[in-house]
Amino acid sequence: MMTLTTINTLRTKLEAARFAAAREGRSLKVALVPTMGYLHEGHASLLRKARAENDLVVLSIFVNPIQFGPGEDFERYPRNPEQDLALAEKEGVDLVFLPEVEEMYPAPTRTQIKVSGLTELLCGASRPGHFDGVTTVVGKLLHIVGPDRAYFGQKDAQQVAVITQMVQDLNWNVEIVPCPIVREQDGLALSSRNVYLSTEERQAALVLSRNLLEVQAGSQAEEVLTASTLREQLRKNISLEPLAVIDYVEVVSFPGLEPLGPEERVDDQGQDGDILVAVAVKFGSTRLIDNVILTKKVNV
Ligand code: AMP
């Protein structure tokens, strides 16, 4: 395919290995930002942070078939490599790794990475095998590119927890850097999948950010708020939107993803430690996820 930009692209593992070899012995800090493309301002924020903190920034664009379940949107997932390369160039990316599926998974492929405990709940419960696909591809990308740091969005908070656990458990020498959620002006969390939404569905989807941001603001208020009240209030408020079909509404510890006792307080007077309030909701055929993290002030 002709590219309109001058940015360097790598399409094979061999090219990527040459890149890795070229930096051997030079103390350059390399960042990897793994994505599935169709880039937006959320991805751009990761690239900017990576650019500010490292010498070389590698962006990978790969729609990873093994993290999609049967009947999910792998085939119709939005793709626009030309636009992505233009954005990458604008953000000062040094290299884009754009492998084909056959390059990443030459047949037969028989090995997968599985993180247990963190992957069976939340998105893992509704998308069995999803996180095995994610950890396998991220593991492969980390090995191919060999970055010092890899950047991930908190939009996929469970993914951040799972990947951090993976690199810790497997003693991989890479720092996982979480980055805040980027939202549209009206609150909707940016996602490549937002293009699927009709005008009515997009309007309806605001119910998620509106309620989650309210929870975040309210968690610092004086009233006693327990995990079960919070979950039920949120579930009720989201259900008021007729187009919203709830997959899950959960309140768990972060990054441990441990369930909270129903009476456990999630306001400022509760136990120390971050709490993840996460939702997955369908609008038509589009499943959206969003979350906020309630960070406790240490009681003084
Ligand atoms: P994706 O292309 O959807 O797989 O996302 C690639 C990376 O961008 C992941 O680490 C996502 O968490 C991150 N990301 C996607 N949307 C956002 C957003 N709205 N804000 C921050 N990061 C995001």
Image (spheres, helix red, strand yellow):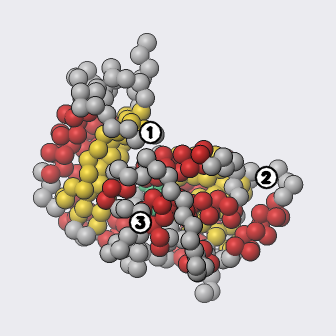
Which element is circle 3 on?
A: helix
Q: Can residue 4 be seen?
A: no
Query: Relative to 266, does residue 192 appear above or below in the rendering?
Result: below
The response on whether ligand 1 sits within 8 Å of label 3 is yes
Q: Report the residue at 69% width, 55% height from top.
A: 147
Q: Which mark is residue 192?
A: 3
95 left or right of 66 in image: right
Q: Which residue is mark 2?
A: 28
Q: Position of residue 246 (x, y in %)?
A: 21, 55
Q: Can you say which quadrant of the picture contains the C terminus?
A: top left
Q: Secondary structure at mark 1?
A: loop
Q: Is residue 262 above or below residue 277?
A: above
Q: Position of residue 285 (x, y in %)?
A: 25, 70
Q: Mark 3 to mark 2: distance in Å?
A: 31 Å
* Dot in front, 2 or 1: 1
Query: In this orientation, which residue lies closer to the viewer: 191 or 88?
Result: 191
- Quadrant of the rendering where the N terminus is positioned: bottom right
In primary-sequence order, the first of circles 3 and 1 is 3
Q: Look at the numbered discs 3 and 1 and tell me whether their residues touch, using CB distance below 8 Å.
A: no
Which image quarter: residue 236?
top left
Q: Which residue is mark 1?
A: 256
